[in-house]
Image (cartoon, rainbow, N blue to C red):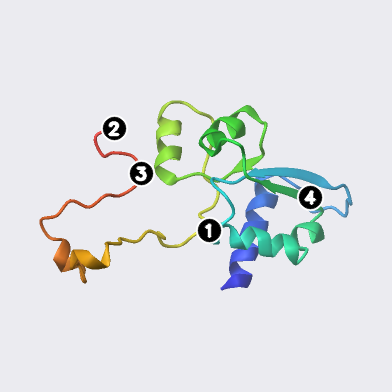
Amino acid sequence: MKNRLMGFILLTVLTCLNISCDTSTDIVQVKLALDWYPNANHIGLYIAQEKGYFEEENLKVEIYTPSDPSTVLQTVASGADDFGMNYQPDVLIARSEGVPVISVLGMVQHPLNSIMALQSSGNKTPKDLKGKKVGYPGIPWNE
């Protein structure tokens, strides 16, 4: 699974940069803005970097957390960043507003969200939440 993810990441980066299959040894600088501080969602990128997968493909990838992660779509659209991680709903909204960005890769296969409650609440199963208000981060459905 890890090898397939790394391969897919590399293939996507190479395809998006339109790198030809010649024997050129020119190093391609790539700037990748994260959507938040480094976490489990980003592990594939750091493994690829640590194992030298990017270097093997003549890529020098700068992975960084922007001072304001909410601006990733704008920095990619302006060309300040080559790639950026963002949440799917935000990308869809940006596209509908004419922001010139596209999705090229899904970093996780399943949502990593969870629901928690205080132990003292008595909520032990999803059934216990019936009829209760549940807070969930993201874009409100009415926007």
Residue with the mark numbered 4: 60
Residue with the mark numbered 2: 143
Q: How far apart are marks 2 and 4 (CA)?
A: 39 Å
Q: Nearer the viewer, mark 4 or mark 3?
A: 3
Residue with the mark numbered 3: 138
Amino acid on which disc 3 is placed: Gly
Instruction: Give the mark nearer the N terminus: 3 vs 1.
Output: 1
Instruction: Give the mark nearer the N terminus: 4 vs 3.
Output: 4
Residue with the mark numbered 1: 41
Instruction: Give the mark nearer the N terminus: 2 vs 1.
Output: 1
Q: In this view, does 124 lie to the left or right of 42?
A: left
Instruction: Give coordinates of residue 51: x percent, y percent.
Output: 75, 67
Foreground residue, 93 or 14?
A: 93
SS type, badge 2:
loop
Badge 2 crowding class, 10 Å Cα cut-off, few under 14, some 14 to 19, many 20 or more, is few
Instruction: Give the mark nearer the N terminus: 2 vs 3.
Output: 3
Residue at x-position 34% and y-position 47% = 137
Amino acid on which disc 2 is placed: Glu
Q: Distance between the residues labelled 4 and 3?
A: 33 Å
